[in-house]
Amino acid sequence: MKTLIYNATVINEGMEFEGAVAIDSEYISSVAQKGSPEYEELMAGADRFSKTIDAQGALLIPGVIDDQVHFREPGATHKGDIRSESAAAVLGGTTSFMDMPNNNPPAVTLERLEEKYRIASEVSSANYSFYLGATNDNIDEILKADSGSICGIKLFMGSSTGNMLVNSDEALEKIFSCNMLVATHCEDEQSIREALEEAKTKWGYDAQGRSLIPFREHPVIRSAQSCIKCTSRAIELALKHHSRLHILHISTAEELAMIRRAKEQNPGITSEICVHYLYFDDTYYDKMGAMVKCNPAIKSREDREAIINEVASLGVDAVATDHAPHTIEEKENDYLKAPSGLPTIQHSLQMMLELSEKGLFPRTTVVTSMCHKPADCFRVSKRGYIRPGYYADLVLVRRVLYTVSDENIAYKCGWSPLKGTTFTYSVTDTFVNGCHTVANGKLTGETNALRLFFDRF
């Protein structure tokens, strides 16, 4: 199908301009600025297109690339699955995702990884890739992995979900020596365990045996220092082995400073920020409790401001979600039993545009941080930009108020920490490989999602 989107405000490669984008099958065939001969030629031949969309007043941006999600399949599909969460993703303008391996069973072999790819090929609304999980003893699987067909190796370094903690120095040395992007979760497990035991003793339990630890203790238990200590170790290994290191969900100002310094020695060290660290700080725990409990913990207002400033200066290499749904029943437990993780992928683009609307950074920075830089960081083939010859992953956003409510939350878990929030912008249309997957804010039932491929490192 050939589609022409015209009269749009195109935001791409640091610029905003009124223009048109033509789609031919899966690819962008033309990008033209209004008033140019190319634009006039497109408009004169509009009858050649199967579909034309007058996008007057709308922003047209590349599809968002989210480099860190937990879609819960296999093993915890009561919380979410690839079908439900990818549908939520495209409703929010995310056209490509990279899913984590801490499933049940964990994706720590290529055979298990390919099973996830098979499921996604059948049910996903968005383009997909999956990390291979690292363990203390699966280096043979890692060495067999193809860097062009999977997004990277996920390393729980210092802290873990389930049985994926890598704490062997020998294993760490081998993993950092491999020719793959290594994405790390950095928190020091020993520090966390010691702080948790202190909190249990300090706060005790009620008569029903429920922990009395308040949720505001979460950033004390999972402290800034535990993150800094582990991130420092990851950087040390990456500098030693000249590794391609991607540090996930940075939550402290000090880590950002450490990474800036490390990049001067190894430009292959990159970082990711998650939207909830831009949107919340530790003052939200008393009001929202488990609804903002995640790992690493949301830290101080000063850390939040430093993170916002780093995004504004284009110092981070990806803004993502760490989308991690749990049921509301699971979240309504006490501190010790309530799981960590927030569902945010349906609203991440709106969150970033809202911060832009408040004057924290321009809209071009939103696109650079969520589309261009993730594509560059992972060397995603032909995505992340509005360019002729690239896949037609495109999003139309209009200045229409949107309030998060039970009626429009698409997550399988059925809730959002943003419920009741009103955003200035609404995602109205999403194209995935040229397929009009979302129209007028609703799923069309049409899908054309593909496996992501990567230019080799």
Image (spheres, helix red, strand yellow):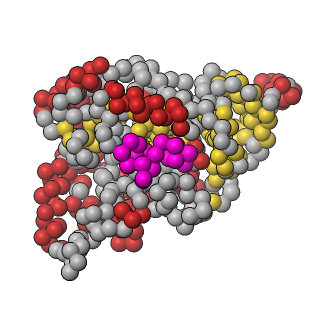
Q: Magenta stretch containing residue 80, yes or no?
A: yes
Which residue: 27% across, 60% down?
219
Figure quadrant of residue 437: top right
Figure quadrant of residue 300: bottom left
Nearer to me, 413 or 452: 413
The x, y position of residue 124, in whole percent, is 53, 38
Which residue: 56% across, 39% down?
125
Nearer to me, 264 or 23: 23
The x, y position of residue 389, in whole percent, is 63, 21
The x, y position of residue 309, in whole percent, is 42, 50
Q: Magenta stretch containing residue 188, yes or no?
A: no
Q: Quarter of the image containing the C terminus?
A: top left
Q: Is residue 368 visible?
A: no
Q: Quarter of the image containing the N terminus?
A: top right
Which residue: 73% across, 40% down?
8
Count of numbered circles in the view: 0
Which range of residues does the magenta coloring cover?
A: 71-89
The x, y position of residue 405, in whole percent, is 57, 64
163 left or right of 56 in image = left
Which residue: 30% across, 40% down?
105
Q: Is residue 340 visible?
A: yes
